[in-house]
Image (cartoon, rainbow, N blue to C red):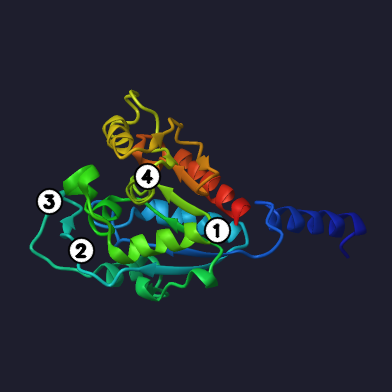
């Protein structure tokens, strides 16, 4: 028979797990994907880390993606574009295990926060940053979602290259895509310069940390913008998710 002490210990463990992110009640979070695969869609490890940390934080999650054609399809073994055509929503469903909705159906009233993983898809399919940089255009449904959540004072989380979406839509905001002038962050300095040209502030932050723009309720972390071990990326995304849930 389990002793009273053992029962108490197990109860304490459950309590600690439930309150890992200090959430008093379940938060409803929308996660927006951009395909499946780092070179032409959402970065799979980032998307998975976000979902794991949201689950650990006790959040309920709905996954969305725009029903549009990908900019192109990349053979991930060769790192080269192919002649294939694929749909962002259909490809994102691979990551969502089939449970996904068209981004056009996203309701800000039904969610407490929204999070965007990175990967080249964020810069190719959710906007055109990959080919136009700071002069890019943002997918209309993505822009509408960002503006709706900020308009309602609800937090927005973005990682890796995805913070450029906020920089384009919200002039004057604060974001991070890593540490500038550091060899471990090979893509940060140029991206940070473009973010500043948009009138935003880039805040240097290491891969293990997130930055919170409290005025705009934006939470960003650099993830694979850093050449870091995957567990460090996982921890940094955890910091971002934790801050999003605290603001929700």
Q: Nearer the viewer, mark 1 or mark 3?
A: 1
Residue 75, image x and y in percent? 16, 56
Q: Nearer the viewer, mark 2 or mark 3?
A: 2
Tag 4 or tag 2, which sits nearer the N-term? 2
**Could you say which disc has been placed on residue 171 in the image?**
4
Residue in view at x 34 percent, y 31 percent: 185
Measured in 3D between alpha carbons, the distance from the residue under mark 1 to the one under mark 3, in whole angstroms, is: 33 Å
Residue corresponding to mark 1: 54
Residue 238, image x and y in percent? 53, 47
Tag 3 or tag 2, which sits nearer the N-term? 2
Q: Nearer the viewer, mark 3 or mark 4?
A: 4
Q: Dot 4: within a 10 Å radius of its alpha carbon, few (fewer than 14), some, or many (20 or more) residues? A: some
Q: Nearer the viewer, mark 4 or mark 1?
A: 4
Q: Dot 3: within a 10 Å radius of its alpha carbon, few (fewer than 14), some, or many (20 or more) residues? A: few
- The answer to which image quadrant residue 96 occupies is bottom left
Residue corresponding to mark 3: 80
Residue 216, image x and y in percent? 50, 48
Tag 1 or tag 4, which sits nearer the N-term? 1
Residue in view at x 32 percent, y 24 percent: 183
Callout 3 touching callout 4 (CB < 8 Å): no
The tally of labels here is 4
Residue in view at x 31 percent, y 69 percent: 66
Q: Quadrant of the C terminus?
A: bottom right
* 98 with respect to 73 (left or right): right
Q: Is residue 230 visible?
A: no
């Amino acid at each position: 028979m389990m002793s009273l002490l053992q029962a108490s210990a197990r109860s304490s463990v459950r309590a600690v797990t439930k309150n890992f992110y200090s959430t008093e009640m379940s938060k409803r979070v929308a996660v927006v994907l951009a395909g499946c695969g780092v070179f032409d869609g959402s970065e799979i490890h980032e998307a998975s880390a976000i979902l794991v940390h949201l689950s650990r934080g006790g959040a309920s999650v709905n996954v969305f993606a725009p029903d549009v054609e990908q900019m192109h399809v990349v053979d991930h073994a060769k790192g080269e574009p192919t002649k294939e055509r694929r749909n962002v929503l259909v490809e994102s469903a691979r990551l969502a295990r089939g449970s996904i909705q068209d981004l056009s159906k996203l309701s800000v009233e039904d969610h407490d926060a929204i999070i965007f993983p990175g990967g080249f898809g964020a810069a190719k399919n959710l906007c055109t940053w990959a080919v136009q940089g700071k002069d890019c255009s943002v997918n209309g449904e993505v822009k509408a979602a960002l503006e709706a959540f900020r308009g309602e004072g609800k937090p927005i989380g973005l990682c890796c290259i995805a913070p450029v979406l906020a920089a384009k839509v919200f002039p004057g905001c604060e974001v991070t895509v890593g540490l500038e002038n550091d060899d471990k962050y090979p893509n940060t300095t140029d991206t940070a310069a473009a973010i500043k040209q948009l009138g935003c502030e880039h805040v240097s932050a290491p891969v293990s940390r997130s930055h919170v723009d409290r005025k705009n309720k934006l939470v960003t972390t650099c993830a694979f913008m850093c050449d870091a071990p995957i567990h460090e990326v996982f921890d940094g995304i955890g910091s971002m998710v934790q801050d999003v849930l605290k603001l929700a």
